[in-house]
Image (cartoon, helix red, strand yellow):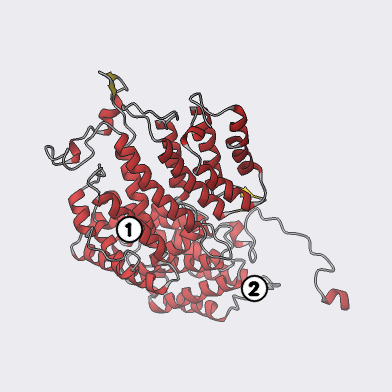
Amino acid sequence: PVGKSGPSSRLQGRVVDKYIGIIGSEDNPAATRGFCLALGHLPPKLLAPSSVVLDSILSCLIDASRKDTLVGNEGDAETRRNALLSLVKVCTAVGLVTNEKSPSDSCPLNKCQLERVFKSMFEALQDYSTDRRGDVGSWSRMVAIDGIVTLAYLAIRATTTFPHSCKAHAATEKLADAPSLSQRRVQRLKPCGRSFRLTYFDENLAHSILDALLKQLGEKLDTVRCKAGESLERLLFSSDPQFPFVPHRELFLQAFRIGNVKTWSDPSVTFPLLFRVISIDDFATPILAGAVISVGGLTESVAKSSCAALFDWVKCLRSTKTLSKLTKMGEVLLHIFEHNRRNGRVILPLLVTMNKLMAHGLLDELIMAQDSVFVRKLMVCISSEAKRCTDVKRLLAIVDVSINLLHPRTHAKIIQEQILVFLLTELLNRFPIVRRHTAEELYLKMIEDPTIFLCDENAIDRGSQILLTTVWHDDQDSAISLTESRNTLADLLSITLPNEERQRSIGKRKGAKSKPRDDFECYSSLVN
């Protein structure tokens, strides 16, 4: 039995220390999964006889929950999921430091420890790991969604700087009357009689939770959307404690029809509701970040519903000439691009989404803007993403977006100095299918709208013939014919290419070292 002074050193070593050691060093995934779960089922007296022991348990579980943690040189989704489950159980078991005296002999969580646990939950929402079983990272994301809601209730109840229930709040009617973040930063933890002002929950945390849940609600997996929708409903429908600091609370609840949605997993129901909430500026970024994954995804039913909802929203903005909202959407799309470089899971659906919007003329206001900020920044992102990219699908999508930027109202200087330079560079891409696709799309654009290229008819005719007759998917390029054809096309279109680019052959870029050819590299050299 555990005495008033806590567990003996022998008991501590045979239970808590042993579990932590096995989780941190064991190569057998079955052991790490089991001991992660076991830590969460220990009594508070063993979990937190002191703040040091509690810290070691939290650190162990947080490390085990990270997506880059390896078990036996491989990642293990079940270990990460079980570690998150136990983190939540440990927090609910030991509780938070409050003004009320507790008869428990355990040491409760402090604010710093709670922030570490919240951070691990938010990081788990970025776990998109896959294996032969599919998106196993979704297991961690679903547990993290539940964990965030549980921890939010725990933090709200322990916070003493705002009312917890609707009844207590009836006199003020709005939660905006609670102390602001700046006011609470000034206030220090000073004793007031026998109690202290405890702040575990604030505006930043509330917004982070709503952003995370809205992003998951817009993604492609039905089970994750269902979990995120139900969790949002629990948070916003709760009256004791009431979830505070919701921007435009009434508008948010009306747009989402909280309490009237039968199933959040149905994309034909979820996405139209989601794009009603996007009108609240605070939520535009997370909603679009989740929606682009669905619009550009492969699941037909999800892509169809999400695409229809996105198109209806953009058409509504264009019909009402709400240019500020359209500009904000462009900024969000660029923000997603810039913060997910080299991340094919996000970039490919984003490119597909942008291509769909451009193909239907829904981004014309951004493309035709006088300052051309959107087009310039997008081309910078595209050029950076294409360098050393080995994902053929992503490269094809990049070419499609670049072609759609060749708009009659696009600034001529951007076309000549950025868009066409990039497309001519891709005519010598290392992948034959990318070269051929670029040539085909350029040829079609020349036939459809030759005025974009700012050349005379003779140059357009000769350029289109080069694109049509050259075998762009030829891998040999022994006579440097593809390079010569590309350079001739650049001269006809009055495009200035760097000297290094003009001398480059297939797939070779500046600074790339060519390996010496082995005399016995091919089979024919062995038999001839």
Q: Is residue 458 left or right of residue 233?
A: right
Of the numbered discs in the image, which one, if any, rests on residue 229? 1
List x then y, in percent, for residue 144: 43, 50
**Which of the pair 141/289 is nearer the observer?**
141
Q: Is residue 29 left or right of residue 236?
A: right
| Residue identifier under label 2 | 481
Which of label 1 and label 2 is nearer to you? 1
Under circle 2, the secondary element is helix
Q: Callout 2: few (<14), some (14-19), or many (20+) C-alpha neighbours within 10 Å?
A: some
Question: Is the residue 525 above or below the residue 1 in the image?
Answer: below
- Rounded to the nearest angstrom, the CA distance separating label 1 from label 2 is 57 Å
List x then y, in percent, for residue 22: 64, 42
Please name the residue shown 16% across and 41% down the image: 167
Pick whichever of labels 1 and 2 is earlier in the sequence. Answer: 1
List x then y, in percent, for residue 85: 47, 48
List x then y, in percent, for residue 161: 25, 31
User: Tag 2: residue type?
Assistant: Ser
**Which of the pair 330/412 is nearer the observer?**
330
Please tell me in which quadrant of the rendered image residue 392 appears: bottom right
User: Tag 1: residue type?
Assistant: Gly
**Which of the pair 404/451 is nearer the observer?**
404
